Every structure is written in C-alpha cells, then in structure tokens.
Image (cartoon, rainbow, N blue to C red):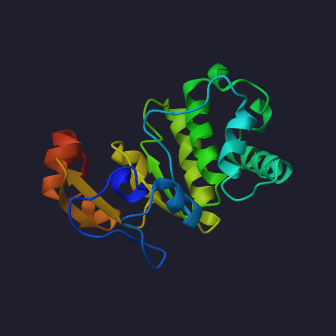
C-alpha cells in the first residue's frame, strides 16, 4: 500500500490523489517534491555517510543550497533527538537510532504527509516510548502521519482513526477504541489474551 501511495509501484486500477492532484502517474521524486515522504521498514541509510549528510540528502528536495540543506538537516536532527550523533557514520548507529535517522531523512523533505512504515519494529519498550513521543511531536507540527504498524498497543494511542488490514483486505476501520474491540481484529491480531483483558 505504501509503495502505491509513494509512487514506488503503479496501481493496476484506480487513481491516487494527493494534495488536490492526481499523482497516479507521478514518479516517487515528484510526489516527494509535492510533500509526500515515507520511511522504509528496512532502513535504507547511506551507511558510509555521516548522519547529517544522510539528512542533507532529504533536505536537498527543497533547496539547491547545501548551506540551507545543512541548516535544515541540523534542525531536523535536533527535533528527532539525533543532533549528538550528527557526525557519526550511519553504520555506527544502533537500530533505534537508525529508525530515527530514517524518520529524520523523511522530515527533511518538509512533508505534508509522512508515511511511517513500521518505525517501532524491533525497538525495546523504552525505545518504542521515545518513538511514540516523536510521532506525537511530528503530528503537533501539522504534518499528517499515516502509519503501518503491527504493534497495535503502541499505535492505538497515537491515532485518530485506524484501518486494519488482514491479507490486504480491510477488516475494520474507525476510532481506535472501537477497532480494538472488533471481533475480526481480535482474531487476526490481538488474540484471546486481549479478549480476556478487555472483557
């Protein structure tokens, strides 16, 4: 789904509209320039480059000035809690920091819509808590966030509306409190332990 929205794949039918435009035939780069950014489940950092240089790559979507791009990258690293790692090589980051770097690169493009692809995967509980705080901060800036996440306990407090897919099919959508009580969602994702806790 994210690959279709971001322009990595083309739909076999239907149209994709974003920010008032039909972007179905637009390449990913044009969608990004329009304000649509994404992260990847498997982090795609440039490991031989510094953290700040990774983020500068994202910032260059909005400017041709390397000075402006560096300034934007510094601002984003501060926002995401990675400023202290700016000069480290991306390969030196721990997994949680690499996930934040992925988010920072996307934020550097100044998105209107940010697609977060399983940014909590593999994080410890304390790292996930910091990840949730970061997503909240992003939302507070006015950026719309669309998340794919399998850890429903983490994502539900963050969202206004949830859509649950099972094998590519929508099985439920609505307010988080309603979604977690839905029988199809419990069966597909939450399991009997959740049913017993919520009874």
Q: Quadrant of residue 18?
A: bottom left
Q: Quadrant of residue 130?
A: top right
The residue most toward the right is 67
The residue most toward the top is 92
Taking the spot 36% from the left edge, 50% from the top edge, the residue there is 3
Taking the spot 57% from the left edge, 40% from the top edge, the residue there is 102
Residue 199 in sight in this render: no
Q: Nearer the viewer, residue 24 or 134?
A: 24
* Residue 93: x %, y % from top left: 64, 24
* Residue 175: x %, y % from top left: 33, 68
Taking the spot 64% from the left edge, 55% from the top edge, the residue there is 109
Residue 194 in sight in this render: yes
Q: Nearer the viewer, residue 95 or 190?
A: 95
For residue 113, side relative to residue 77 (left or right): left
For residue 162, side relative to residue 188 (left or right): right
* Residue 187: x %, y % from top left: 13, 47
């Amino acid at each position: 789904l994210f690959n279709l929205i971001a322009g990595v794949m083309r739909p076999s039918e239907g149209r994709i509209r974003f920010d008032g435009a039909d972007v179905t035939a637009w390449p990913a780069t044009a969608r990004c320039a329009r304000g649509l950014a994404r992260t990847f489940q498997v982090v795609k950092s440039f490991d031989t480059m510094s953290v700040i240089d990774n983020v500068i790559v994202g910032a260059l979507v909005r400017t041709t000035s390397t000075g402006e791009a560096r300034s934007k990258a510094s601002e984003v690293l501060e926002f995401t809690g990675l400023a202290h790692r700016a000069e480290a090589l991306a390969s030196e980051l721990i997994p949680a920091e690499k996930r934040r770097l992925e988010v920072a690169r996307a934020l550097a493009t100044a998105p209107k819509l940010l697609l977060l692809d399983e940014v909590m995967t593999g994080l410890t509980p304390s790292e996930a808590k910091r990840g949730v705080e970061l997503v909240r901060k992003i939302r507070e800036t006015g950026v719309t966030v669309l998340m794919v996440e399998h850890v429903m306990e983490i994502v539900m407090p963050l969202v206004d509306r949830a859509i649950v897919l099972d094998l590519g099919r929508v099985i439920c959508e609505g307010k988080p409190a309603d979604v977690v009580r839905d029988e199809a969602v419990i069966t597909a994702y939450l399991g009997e332990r959740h049913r017993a806790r919520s009874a």
